[in-house]
Amino acid sequence: MNILVPVKRVPDPYAKVKPLPDGSGLDTAGLKFEVNPFDEIALEEAVRLREKGLPASITAVSVGAAECEEQLRKALAMGADQAILVETSDALDSSVVAAELAALVLELGIDLVLMGKQATDDDANQVAQLLAAKLDWPQATFASAVEVADGRVVVKRETDTGEETLSMRLPAVVSADLRLNEPRYIALPGIIKARSKPLERRPRATEAVAKVRVVFYEAPPAREPGRKVSSVDELVAALKDRGVIA
Amino acid sequence: MSRLLIVAFDVAESSSLAGFADALGIPFDLLLLSAGVPAPIGAEKVFLAGMPSIPVADAMAKALARFAAPYTHVAAVSSMRSKDILARTAGVLDAAMVTDAVEVLGVRKFKRPVFAGTVMATVEVAPSAILLTVRPAGFEAPEPAPNGPAENVVLDADSMAERSAVSARSGGRPDLTQAKVIVSGGRPLKDAATFERVVGGLADALGGAVGATRAAVDSGIAPNELQVGQTGKIVAPDLYIAAGISGSTQHMAGIKDSKVIVAINKDPDAPIFEAADLGLVADLYEAIPELLAKVKS
Protein backbone atom coordinates (compact mmCIF):
# COMPACT_ATOMS: atom_id res chain seq x y z
CA MET A 1 0.00 0.00 0.00
CA ASN A 2 1.30 3.42 -0.96
CA ILE A 3 0.84 6.32 1.42
CA LEU A 4 1.62 9.89 0.45
CA VAL A 5 2.31 12.47 3.15
CA PRO A 6 2.61 16.08 1.94
CA VAL A 7 4.97 18.06 4.14
CA LYS A 8 5.04 21.85 4.23
CA ARG A 9 7.96 24.00 5.31
CA VAL A 10 6.66 26.68 7.68
CA PRO A 11 8.26 29.24 10.02
CA ASP A 12 8.63 27.98 13.59
CA PRO A 13 5.01 28.01 14.81
CA TYR A 14 6.10 29.30 18.21
CA ALA A 15 8.07 32.23 16.84
CA LYS A 16 6.58 35.68 16.33
CA VAL A 17 6.34 36.43 12.63
CA LYS A 18 6.21 40.09 11.63
CA PRO A 19 5.22 41.76 8.37
CA LEU A 20 7.91 43.74 6.56
CA PRO A 21 7.49 47.50 7.11
CA ASP A 22 6.22 47.99 3.52
CA GLY A 23 3.81 45.05 3.80
CA SER A 24 5.29 43.29 0.78
CA GLY A 25 6.14 40.15 2.69
CA LEU A 26 7.12 38.69 6.02
CA ASP A 27 10.29 39.32 7.94
CA THR A 28 11.72 35.81 8.03
CA ALA A 29 15.26 36.86 9.00
CA GLY A 30 16.53 34.69 11.82
CA LEU A 31 13.43 32.49 11.83
CA LYS A 32 13.81 28.76 12.11
CA PHE A 33 11.73 26.67 9.74
CA GLU A 34 9.97 23.47 10.71
CA VAL A 35 7.71 20.79 9.30
CA ASN A 36 4.13 22.06 9.60
CA PRO A 37 3.04 20.47 12.92
CA PHE A 38 -0.14 19.01 11.44
CA ASP A 39 1.84 17.35 8.64
CA GLU A 40 4.14 15.92 11.29
CA ILE A 41 1.09 14.37 12.96
CA ALA A 42 -0.03 12.94 9.61
CA LEU A 43 3.40 11.44 8.99
CA GLU A 44 3.53 10.00 12.50
CA GLU A 45 0.18 8.32 11.81
CA ALA A 46 1.45 6.82 8.56
CA VAL A 47 4.51 5.44 10.35
CA ARG A 48 2.33 4.03 13.14
CA LEU A 49 0.06 2.30 10.61
CA ARG A 50 3.12 0.59 9.20
CA GLU A 51 4.43 -0.27 12.66
CA LYS A 52 1.06 -1.87 13.44
CA GLY A 53 1.64 -4.25 10.55
CA LEU A 54 0.20 -2.50 7.53
CA PRO A 55 2.56 -3.19 4.62
CA ALA A 56 3.05 0.39 3.51
CA SER A 57 5.52 2.44 1.56
CA ILE A 58 5.50 6.05 2.75
CA THR A 59 6.45 8.89 0.43
CA ALA A 60 6.86 12.41 1.78
CA VAL A 61 6.45 15.26 -0.69
CA SER A 62 7.00 19.00 -0.59
CA VAL A 63 6.10 21.53 -3.24
CA GLY A 64 8.29 24.60 -3.05
CA ALA A 65 11.80 25.99 -2.94
CA ALA A 66 15.06 24.04 -2.58
CA GLU A 67 15.10 24.76 1.17
CA CYS A 68 12.19 22.33 1.65
CA GLU A 69 14.80 19.58 1.51
CA GLU A 70 15.48 20.29 5.20
CA GLN A 71 11.90 19.34 6.11
CA LEU A 72 11.90 16.32 3.79
CA ARG A 73 15.06 15.05 5.55
CA LYS A 74 13.20 15.37 8.82
CA ALA A 75 10.31 13.39 7.31
CA LEU A 76 12.73 10.67 6.19
CA ALA A 77 14.19 10.59 9.70
CA MET A 78 10.70 10.18 11.14
CA GLY A 79 10.13 7.12 8.98
CA ALA A 80 9.19 8.07 5.42
CA ASP A 81 10.79 5.65 2.94
CA GLN A 82 11.44 8.18 0.23
CA ALA A 83 10.91 11.85 -0.43
CA ILE A 84 10.09 13.96 -3.44
CA LEU A 85 10.68 17.67 -3.76
CA VAL A 86 8.62 19.29 -6.49
CA GLU A 87 10.95 22.21 -6.82
CA THR A 88 9.55 25.54 -7.90
CA SER A 89 9.85 29.24 -7.27
CA ASP A 90 6.36 29.93 -8.66
CA ALA A 91 3.75 31.70 -6.59
CA LEU A 92 1.81 28.92 -4.89
CA ASP A 93 -1.64 28.74 -3.41
CA SER A 94 -3.63 25.77 -2.16
CA SER A 95 -5.04 25.04 -5.63
CA VAL A 96 -1.60 24.84 -7.25
CA VAL A 97 -0.31 22.55 -4.51
CA ALA A 98 -3.41 20.37 -4.84
CA ALA A 99 -2.90 20.15 -8.62
CA GLU A 100 0.73 19.08 -8.19
CA LEU A 101 -0.21 16.55 -5.52
CA ALA A 102 -3.00 15.13 -7.68
CA ALA A 103 -0.56 14.52 -10.54
CA LEU A 104 1.87 12.81 -8.18
CA VAL A 105 -0.85 10.68 -6.57
CA LEU A 106 -1.85 9.27 -9.94
CA GLU A 107 1.72 8.71 -11.10
CA LEU A 108 2.76 6.89 -7.92
CA GLY A 109 -0.41 4.83 -7.54
CA ILE A 110 -1.14 6.24 -4.09
CA ASP A 111 -3.84 4.52 -1.99
CA LEU A 112 -3.99 6.90 0.93
CA VAL A 113 -3.04 10.56 1.32
CA LEU A 114 -2.46 11.52 4.95
CA MET A 115 -1.80 15.21 5.49
CA GLY A 116 -2.20 18.03 7.98
CA LYS A 117 -5.58 19.73 8.15
CA GLN A 118 -3.94 23.11 7.76
CA ALA A 119 -0.53 24.75 7.75
CA THR A 120 0.36 27.00 10.65
CA ASP A 121 1.54 29.77 8.31
CA ASP A 122 -1.44 30.48 6.04
CA ASP A 123 -4.05 28.66 8.18
CA ALA A 124 -5.99 27.93 4.97
CA ASN A 125 -7.26 24.41 5.62
CA GLN A 126 -7.89 23.68 1.93
CA VAL A 127 -5.40 21.38 0.23
CA ALA A 128 -6.79 18.05 1.46
CA GLN A 129 -10.31 18.96 0.32
CA LEU A 130 -9.15 20.42 -3.02
CA LEU A 131 -7.05 17.33 -3.67
CA ALA A 132 -9.87 14.93 -2.79
CA ALA A 133 -12.21 16.85 -5.11
CA LYS A 134 -9.72 16.77 -7.99
CA LEU A 135 -9.24 13.02 -7.57
CA ASP A 136 -12.94 12.44 -6.86
CA TRP A 137 -11.90 10.43 -3.80
CA PRO A 138 -13.70 10.35 -0.46
CA GLN A 139 -12.27 12.61 2.23
CA ALA A 140 -12.16 12.72 6.01
CA THR A 141 -10.87 15.99 7.45
CA PHE A 142 -10.04 16.75 11.11
CA ALA A 143 -9.10 13.12 11.84
CA SER A 144 -8.60 12.09 15.46
CA ALA A 145 -8.24 8.32 14.84
CA VAL A 146 -7.38 6.33 11.70
CA GLU A 147 -7.64 2.60 11.05
CA VAL A 148 -6.92 0.82 7.80
CA ALA A 149 -8.23 -2.69 7.09
CA ASP A 150 -9.77 -4.67 4.25
CA GLY A 151 -9.29 -1.97 1.67
CA ARG A 152 -11.07 0.61 3.78
CA VAL A 153 -9.99 3.45 6.01
CA VAL A 154 -12.12 4.21 9.04
CA VAL A 155 -11.65 7.69 10.43
CA LYS A 156 -12.95 9.20 13.62
CA ARG A 157 -13.14 12.92 12.95
CA GLU A 158 -13.80 15.99 15.04
CA THR A 159 -16.81 18.10 14.15
CA ASP A 160 -18.27 21.41 15.32
CA THR A 161 -20.56 19.51 17.65
CA GLY A 162 -18.46 16.52 18.71
CA GLU A 163 -17.26 13.57 16.68
CA GLU A 164 -18.35 11.24 13.92
CA THR A 165 -16.91 8.22 12.17
CA LEU A 166 -16.49 7.89 8.40
CA SER A 167 -15.77 4.58 6.73
CA MET A 168 -14.33 4.97 3.22
CA ARG A 169 -13.16 2.58 0.56
CA LEU A 170 -9.56 3.30 -0.48
CA PRO A 171 -8.19 5.32 -2.14
CA ALA A 172 -8.99 8.28 0.10
CA VAL A 173 -7.68 11.55 1.51
CA VAL A 174 -7.43 12.05 5.28
CA SER A 175 -6.41 15.27 7.03
CA ALA A 176 -4.98 15.12 10.54
CA ASP A 177 -6.14 17.15 13.51
CA LEU A 178 -4.24 17.80 16.72
CA ARG A 179 -5.41 14.84 18.72
CA LEU A 180 -4.58 12.13 16.20
CA ASN A 181 -1.27 11.39 17.91
CA GLU A 182 1.84 12.93 19.40
CA PRO A 183 4.71 12.76 16.92
CA ARG A 184 7.89 11.07 18.06
CA TYR A 185 10.98 13.09 18.83
CA ILE A 186 13.74 12.76 16.25
CA ALA A 187 17.26 13.38 17.48
CA LEU A 188 19.90 14.81 15.17
CA PRO A 189 21.65 11.44 14.54
CA GLY A 190 18.39 10.14 13.10
CA ILE A 191 18.29 13.03 10.66
CA ILE A 192 21.89 12.38 9.62
CA LYS A 193 21.15 8.67 9.20
CA ALA A 194 18.22 9.50 6.95
CA ARG A 195 20.63 11.08 4.47
CA SER A 196 21.03 7.70 2.81
CA LYS A 197 17.32 7.50 1.98
CA PRO A 198 16.29 8.58 -1.52
CA LEU A 199 15.22 12.20 -2.06
CA GLU A 200 14.23 13.03 -5.60
CA ARG A 201 14.02 16.58 -6.95
CA ARG A 202 11.80 17.15 -9.92
CA PRO A 203 10.10 20.03 -11.70
CA ARG A 204 6.38 20.74 -11.55
CA ALA A 205 4.07 18.44 -13.47
CA THR A 206 1.19 20.88 -14.08
CA GLU A 207 0.74 24.41 -15.31
CA ALA A 208 -1.78 25.36 -12.65
CA VAL A 209 -1.60 29.04 -11.74
CA ALA A 210 -2.32 30.48 -8.30
CA LYS A 211 -5.85 31.84 -7.96
CA VAL A 212 -5.32 33.51 -4.60
CA ARG A 213 -2.35 35.75 -3.99
CA VAL A 214 -1.34 37.65 -0.89
CA VAL A 215 -0.69 41.26 -1.88
CA PHE A 216 -0.20 42.84 1.54
CA TYR A 217 0.73 41.83 5.07
CA GLU A 218 0.09 43.93 8.16
CA ALA A 219 -0.14 43.62 11.90
CA PRO A 220 -3.67 43.11 13.21
CA PRO A 221 -5.37 46.05 14.93
CA ALA A 222 -4.24 46.21 18.53
CA ARG A 223 -6.77 45.88 21.32
CA GLU A 224 -7.15 48.77 23.71
CA PRO A 225 -4.93 48.11 26.71
CA GLY A 226 -6.89 46.67 29.62
CA ARG A 227 -6.52 47.09 33.34
CA LYS A 228 -6.30 44.94 36.40
CA VAL A 229 -9.03 44.95 38.99
CA SER A 230 -8.28 44.14 42.60
CA SER A 231 -11.42 42.34 43.66
CA VAL A 232 -14.47 40.48 42.40
CA ASP A 233 -16.61 43.45 43.47
CA GLU A 234 -14.57 45.77 41.27
CA LEU A 235 -14.85 43.26 38.41
CA VAL A 236 -18.63 43.03 38.74
CA ALA A 237 -18.91 46.83 38.82
CA ALA A 238 -16.75 47.16 35.69
CA LEU A 239 -18.79 44.52 33.84
CA LYS A 240 -22.05 46.27 34.76
CA ASP A 241 -20.53 49.56 33.71
CA ARG A 242 -19.77 48.12 30.27
CA GLY A 243 -23.26 46.66 30.02
CA VAL A 244 -22.14 43.07 29.50
CA ILE A 245 -23.87 41.74 32.61
CA ALA A 246 -27.17 42.83 34.11
CA MET B 1 -22.49 40.08 -13.55
CA SER B 2 -21.50 39.38 -9.96
CA ARG B 3 -23.90 37.49 -7.74
CA LEU B 4 -23.44 36.05 -4.26
CA LEU B 5 -24.93 32.87 -2.85
CA ILE B 6 -24.99 32.72 0.93
CA VAL B 7 -25.02 29.13 2.12
CA ALA B 8 -26.56 28.82 5.59
CA PHE B 9 -26.28 25.37 7.12
CA ASP B 10 -28.99 26.18 9.65
CA VAL B 11 -31.43 28.95 10.56
CA ALA B 12 -29.01 30.46 13.10
CA GLU B 13 -26.49 31.02 10.30
CA SER B 14 -29.04 32.56 7.94
CA SER B 15 -28.62 36.04 9.39
CA SER B 16 -24.89 35.83 10.15
CA LEU B 17 -23.65 36.90 6.73
CA ALA B 18 -25.99 39.84 6.11
CA GLY B 19 -23.15 42.20 7.08
CA PHE B 20 -20.72 40.45 4.74
CA ALA B 21 -23.23 40.62 1.86
CA ASP B 22 -23.74 44.30 2.59
CA ALA B 23 -19.98 44.92 2.52
CA LEU B 24 -19.56 42.98 -0.73
CA GLY B 25 -22.35 45.06 -2.24
CA ILE B 26 -23.54 42.70 -4.99
CA PRO B 27 -26.99 41.11 -5.40
CA PHE B 28 -27.36 37.98 -3.31
CA ASP B 29 -29.51 34.92 -2.76
CA LEU B 30 -29.75 32.73 0.30
CA LEU B 31 -29.63 28.94 0.36
CA LEU B 32 -30.78 27.39 3.64
CA LEU B 33 -29.69 23.77 3.80
CA SER B 34 -31.55 22.50 6.87
CA ALA B 35 -35.27 22.90 7.44
CA GLY B 36 -36.60 26.15 8.84
CA VAL B 37 -37.48 29.75 8.16
CA PRO B 38 -34.50 31.98 7.36
CA ALA B 39 -34.00 35.40 8.91
CA PRO B 40 -34.99 38.48 6.86
CA ILE B 41 -31.70 39.70 5.39
CA GLY B 42 -32.83 41.18 2.09
CA ALA B 43 -31.92 38.21 -0.10
CA GLU B 44 -33.38 38.52 -3.60
CA LYS B 45 -34.27 34.85 -3.65
CA VAL B 46 -34.39 32.22 -0.95
CA PHE B 47 -33.81 28.55 -1.67
CA LEU B 48 -34.94 26.06 0.94
CA ALA B 49 -33.25 22.65 0.77
CA GLY B 50 -34.93 21.33 3.94
CA MET B 51 -32.26 18.70 4.56
CA PRO B 52 -32.81 16.59 7.70
CA SER B 53 -29.03 16.35 8.10
CA ILE B 54 -26.06 17.73 6.19
CA PRO B 55 -24.55 15.03 3.92
CA VAL B 56 -20.89 13.97 4.06
CA ALA B 57 -18.56 16.48 2.35
CA ASP B 58 -18.07 14.69 -0.98
CA ALA B 59 -21.82 14.41 -1.58
CA MET B 60 -22.65 17.87 -0.23
CA ALA B 61 -19.90 19.46 -2.31
CA LYS B 62 -21.09 17.78 -5.48
CA ALA B 63 -24.66 18.95 -4.96
CA LEU B 64 -23.55 22.41 -3.91
CA ALA B 65 -21.24 22.75 -6.91
CA ARG B 66 -24.13 22.06 -9.27
CA PHE B 67 -26.36 24.55 -7.48
CA ALA B 68 -23.72 27.26 -7.07
CA ALA B 69 -22.30 27.10 -10.60
CA PRO B 70 -24.04 30.30 -11.80
CA TYR B 71 -22.69 32.41 -8.93
CA THR B 72 -19.47 34.43 -8.86
CA HIS B 73 -19.30 34.29 -5.05
CA VAL B 74 -20.38 31.60 -2.59
CA ALA B 75 -20.00 32.26 1.13
CA ALA B 76 -20.70 30.43 4.37
CA VAL B 77 -19.95 31.12 8.02
CA SER B 78 -16.51 29.77 8.99
CA SER B 79 -16.76 26.46 10.81
CA MET B 80 -15.18 23.03 10.59
CA ARG B 81 -18.19 21.93 8.53
CA SER B 82 -17.99 24.82 6.07
CA LYS B 83 -14.24 24.41 5.63
CA ASP B 84 -14.73 20.70 4.99
CA ILE B 85 -17.46 21.26 2.41
CA LEU B 86 -16.71 24.60 0.72
CA ALA B 87 -13.05 23.86 0.04
CA ARG B 88 -14.13 20.62 -1.61
CA THR B 89 -16.78 22.49 -3.57
CA ALA B 90 -14.08 24.89 -4.77
CA GLY B 91 -12.12 21.87 -5.98
CA VAL B 92 -15.12 20.52 -7.87
CA LEU B 93 -15.75 23.90 -9.50
CA ASP B 94 -12.04 24.68 -9.99
CA ALA B 95 -12.83 27.91 -8.17
CA ALA B 96 -10.74 29.99 -5.77
CA MET B 97 -11.11 29.42 -2.04
CA VAL B 98 -10.66 32.09 0.60
CA THR B 99 -10.69 30.87 4.21
CA ASP B 100 -11.77 33.03 7.15
CA ALA B 101 -12.44 36.34 5.39
CA VAL B 102 -12.77 39.12 7.98
CA GLU B 103 -12.96 42.18 5.74
CA VAL B 104 -14.04 43.02 2.19
CA LEU B 105 -11.73 45.36 0.28
CA GLY B 106 -13.28 44.76 -3.15
CA VAL B 107 -15.25 42.06 -4.95
CA ARG B 108 -12.03 40.12 -5.44
CA LYS B 109 -10.01 41.43 -2.51
CA PHE B 110 -10.32 40.30 1.09
CA LYS B 111 -8.49 40.44 4.37
CA ARG B 112 -7.89 37.27 6.36
CA PRO B 113 -5.80 36.27 9.38
CA VAL B 114 -2.68 34.14 8.99
CA PHE B 115 -0.17 32.83 11.55
CA ALA B 116 -2.89 32.29 14.16
CA GLY B 117 -4.15 35.83 13.69
CA THR B 118 -0.82 37.48 14.51
CA VAL B 119 -0.60 38.79 10.92
CA MET B 120 -3.35 39.96 8.57
CA ALA B 121 -3.03 39.14 4.88
CA THR B 122 -4.78 40.94 2.06
CA VAL B 123 -5.53 38.46 -0.72
CA GLU B 124 -6.46 39.14 -4.30
CA VAL B 125 -8.35 36.54 -6.29
CA ALA B 126 -7.75 35.95 -10.00
CA PRO B 127 -10.80 35.94 -12.30
CA SER B 128 -12.68 32.78 -11.30
CA ALA B 129 -15.56 31.98 -9.02
CA ILE B 130 -14.74 32.63 -5.36
CA LEU B 131 -15.80 30.48 -2.45
CA LEU B 132 -15.35 31.94 0.99
CA THR B 133 -15.70 31.01 4.58
CA VAL B 134 -16.38 34.19 6.51
CA ARG B 135 -15.97 35.19 10.14
CA PRO B 136 -19.04 37.33 10.75
CA ALA B 137 -17.70 39.24 13.79
CA GLY B 138 -15.96 41.91 11.74
CA PHE B 139 -19.03 42.86 9.74
CA GLU B 140 -21.71 45.19 10.97
CA ALA B 141 -25.16 43.68 10.50
CA PRO B 142 -27.53 45.91 8.51
CA GLU B 143 -31.19 46.46 9.46
CA PRO B 144 -33.34 43.38 8.75
CA ALA B 145 -34.96 43.54 5.32
CA PRO B 146 -37.56 41.23 3.81
CA ASN B 147 -36.32 38.43 1.58
CA GLY B 148 -37.62 37.87 -1.93
CA PRO B 149 -39.62 34.81 -2.95
CA ALA B 150 -38.73 31.43 -1.51
CA GLU B 151 -38.43 28.25 -3.52
CA ASN B 152 -37.97 24.66 -2.38
CA VAL B 153 -34.98 22.94 -3.93
CA VAL B 154 -33.70 19.38 -3.85
CA LEU B 155 -29.98 18.99 -3.24
CA ASP B 156 -28.75 15.45 -3.23
CA ALA B 157 -25.85 13.29 -4.27
CA ASP B 158 -24.48 9.97 -3.08
CA SER B 159 -21.52 9.88 -0.74
CA MET B 160 -18.55 7.57 -1.13
CA ALA B 161 -18.26 7.46 2.67
CA GLU B 162 -20.45 5.83 5.27
CA ARG B 163 -21.11 7.93 8.33
CA SER B 164 -21.69 6.44 11.76
CA ALA B 165 -21.25 7.15 15.47
CA VAL B 166 -22.26 10.79 15.30
CA SER B 167 -22.05 12.48 18.68
CA ALA B 168 -24.10 15.61 19.21
CA ARG B 169 -23.57 18.55 21.51
CA SER B 170 -24.86 18.17 25.02
CA GLY B 171 -27.93 20.37 24.93
CA GLY B 172 -29.06 23.35 26.93
CA ARG B 173 -26.25 25.82 26.38
CA PRO B 174 -25.93 28.27 23.50
CA ASP B 175 -23.64 27.50 20.58
CA LEU B 176 -20.10 28.81 21.19
CA THR B 177 -19.95 30.66 17.90
CA GLN B 178 -23.29 32.41 18.53
CA ALA B 179 -23.05 32.97 22.29
CA LYS B 180 -23.14 36.46 23.84
CA VAL B 181 -21.30 35.22 26.92
CA ILE B 182 -18.62 32.53 27.11
CA VAL B 183 -16.87 31.18 30.17
CA SER B 184 -13.73 29.23 29.31
CA GLY B 185 -11.41 27.17 31.40
CA GLY B 186 -7.90 25.79 31.14
CA ARG B 187 -5.97 22.93 32.63
CA PRO B 188 -6.04 24.27 36.23
CA LEU B 189 -9.65 23.01 36.30
CA LYS B 190 -8.18 19.56 37.13
CA ASP B 191 -10.88 17.20 35.88
CA ALA B 192 -14.13 17.03 33.93
CA ALA B 193 -16.37 17.23 37.00
CA THR B 194 -14.56 20.28 38.40
CA PHE B 195 -14.57 21.94 35.00
CA GLU B 196 -18.30 21.40 34.62
CA ARG B 197 -19.06 22.58 38.16
CA VAL B 198 -16.90 25.73 38.12
CA VAL B 199 -16.86 26.84 34.49
CA GLY B 200 -20.25 25.36 33.56
CA GLY B 201 -21.81 26.76 36.73
CA LEU B 202 -20.77 30.33 35.96
CA ALA B 203 -21.71 29.96 32.30
CA ASP B 204 -25.20 28.82 33.25
CA ALA B 205 -25.62 31.69 35.72
CA LEU B 206 -24.78 34.10 32.88
CA GLY B 207 -26.81 32.25 30.26
CA GLY B 208 -23.61 31.64 28.35
CA ALA B 209 -21.67 28.94 26.55
CA VAL B 210 -18.68 26.96 27.81
CA GLY B 211 -15.29 26.99 26.12
CA ALA B 212 -11.95 25.37 26.81
CA THR B 213 -8.28 25.59 25.94
CA ARG B 214 -6.47 23.01 23.88
CA ALA B 215 -4.62 21.90 27.02
CA ALA B 216 -7.92 21.30 28.82
CA VAL B 217 -9.25 19.28 25.87
CA ASP B 218 -6.03 17.32 25.41
CA SER B 219 -6.03 16.32 29.06
CA GLY B 220 -9.61 15.11 28.90
CA ILE B 221 -11.08 17.85 31.10
CA ALA B 222 -13.36 19.16 28.33
CA PRO B 223 -14.76 17.67 25.09
CA ASN B 224 -13.08 18.60 21.81
CA GLU B 225 -15.97 20.64 20.41
CA LEU B 226 -15.45 23.20 23.19
CA GLN B 227 -11.90 24.06 22.12
CA VAL B 228 -11.44 27.73 21.37
CA GLY B 229 -8.47 28.96 19.37
CA GLN B 230 -6.54 28.77 16.11
CA THR B 231 -7.44 25.15 15.53
CA GLY B 232 -10.74 25.18 17.39
CA LYS B 233 -13.64 27.59 17.40
CA ILE B 234 -13.28 31.27 16.67
CA VAL B 235 -15.62 33.15 18.98
CA ALA B 236 -16.79 36.74 19.29
CA PRO B 237 -19.04 37.12 22.34
CA ASP B 238 -19.81 40.35 24.17
CA LEU B 239 -18.16 38.86 27.25
CA TYR B 240 -15.40 36.24 27.36
CA ILE B 241 -14.32 35.09 30.80
CA ALA B 242 -11.05 33.13 30.78
CA ALA B 243 -10.56 31.16 33.97
CA GLY B 244 -7.17 29.63 34.60
CA ILE B 245 -6.05 30.30 31.02
CA SER B 246 -2.49 31.46 30.43
CA GLY B 247 -3.25 32.92 27.00
CA SER B 248 -1.21 31.16 24.32
CA THR B 249 -1.07 32.78 20.88
CA GLN B 250 -3.15 29.88 19.57
CA HIS B 251 -5.88 30.48 22.15
CA MET B 252 -5.87 34.26 21.75
CA ALA B 253 -6.35 33.78 17.99
CA GLY B 254 -9.81 32.45 18.75
CA ILE B 255 -11.02 35.16 21.14
CA LYS B 256 -9.62 38.48 20.01
CA ASP B 257 -12.90 39.61 18.45
CA SER B 258 -14.62 39.38 21.84
CA LYS B 259 -15.93 42.76 23.06
CA VAL B 260 -14.80 42.38 26.67
CA ILE B 261 -12.20 39.82 27.72
CA VAL B 262 -11.92 39.04 31.43
CA ALA B 263 -8.98 37.04 32.73
CA ILE B 264 -8.96 35.35 36.11
CA ASN B 265 -5.61 33.75 36.82
CA LYS B 266 -3.45 33.44 39.89
CA ASP B 267 -0.26 33.98 37.90
CA PRO B 268 0.18 37.77 37.58
CA ASP B 269 2.62 37.25 34.70
CA ALA B 270 0.26 35.15 32.54
CA PRO B 271 0.26 36.55 28.97
CA ILE B 272 -3.54 36.65 28.99
CA PHE B 273 -3.38 39.78 31.15
CA GLU B 274 -1.82 41.67 28.23
CA ALA B 275 -4.88 41.02 26.09
CA ALA B 276 -7.58 41.12 28.75
CA ASP B 277 -9.73 44.22 29.17
CA LEU B 278 -10.21 43.34 32.82
CA GLY B 279 -7.77 41.18 34.69
CA LEU B 280 -8.16 39.73 38.16
CA VAL B 281 -5.15 38.08 39.77
CA ALA B 282 -6.83 35.52 41.98
CA ASP B 283 -7.32 31.85 42.65
CA LEU B 284 -10.17 30.85 40.34
CA TYR B 285 -11.58 28.49 42.98
CA GLU B 286 -12.23 31.51 45.19
CA ALA B 287 -12.98 34.13 42.57
CA ILE B 288 -15.42 32.17 40.39
CA PRO B 289 -17.77 31.11 43.22
CA GLU B 290 -17.74 34.69 44.51
CA LEU B 291 -18.43 36.03 41.03
CA LEU B 292 -21.21 33.49 40.57
CA ALA B 293 -22.83 34.50 43.85
CA LYS B 294 -22.63 38.17 42.95
CA VAL B 295 -24.06 37.89 39.44
CA LYS B 296 -26.89 35.75 40.77
CA SER B 297 -27.87 38.22 43.47
Image (cartoon, helix red, strand yellow):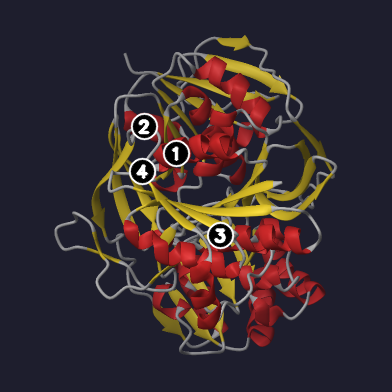
Quadrant of the snapshot with the N terminus of chain B: top left
Instruction: Residue B247: give x, y in percent of width and height.
Output: 50, 75
Q: Can residue A242 be seen here?
A: no
Q: Which residue is mark 3?
A: A38
Estimate how packed mark 4 is, as few (under 14), some (14 to 19) or many (20 or more) residues with alpha carbons within 10 Å.
few
Asked if badge 4 and badge 2 are on a common chain, one would say yes
Cα–Cα span, label 4 and label 3? 25 Å
Circle 4: residue type: Pro
Indicate which disc residue A203 carries.
Answer: 4
Task: Please say if the residues under marks 4 and 2 sit with CB atoms less than 8 Å apart.
Answer: no
Q: Residue at x 65, y 30 (%)?
A: B58
Cα–Cα span, label 4 and label 2? 13 Å
In front: label 4 or label 2: 4
Cα–Cα span, label 3 and label 1? 20 Å
Instruction: Residue B152: give x, y in percent of width and height.
Output: 65, 11
In front: label 3 or label 2: 2
Cα–Cα span, label 1 and label 4? 10 Å
Locate residue A92: give its quadrant.
top left
Is B60 left, or right, of A68 in this rendering? right
Using the image as rendered, state which of residue A182 and residue A100 is in the foreground. Answer: A100
Circle 1: residue type: Glu
Using the image as rendered, state which of residue A85 and residue A10 is in the foreground. Answer: A85
Indicate which disc, 4 or 3, sits on the residue closer to the N terminus: 3
Q: Can residue A56 be seen here?
A: yes
Q: Which residue is mark 2?
A: A208
Task: Please say if the residues under marks 1 and 4 sit with CB atoms less than 8 Å apart.
Answer: no
Chain assignment, label 3: A
- Rendered view: A224 above or below B70: below
Chain assignment, label 2: A
Estimate how packed mark 2 is, as few (under 14), some (14 to 19) or many (20 or more) residues with alpha carbons within 10 Å.
some
Task: Please say if the residues under marks 1 and 2 sit with CB atoms less than 8 Å apart.
Answer: yes
- Rendered view: B258 above or below A102: below
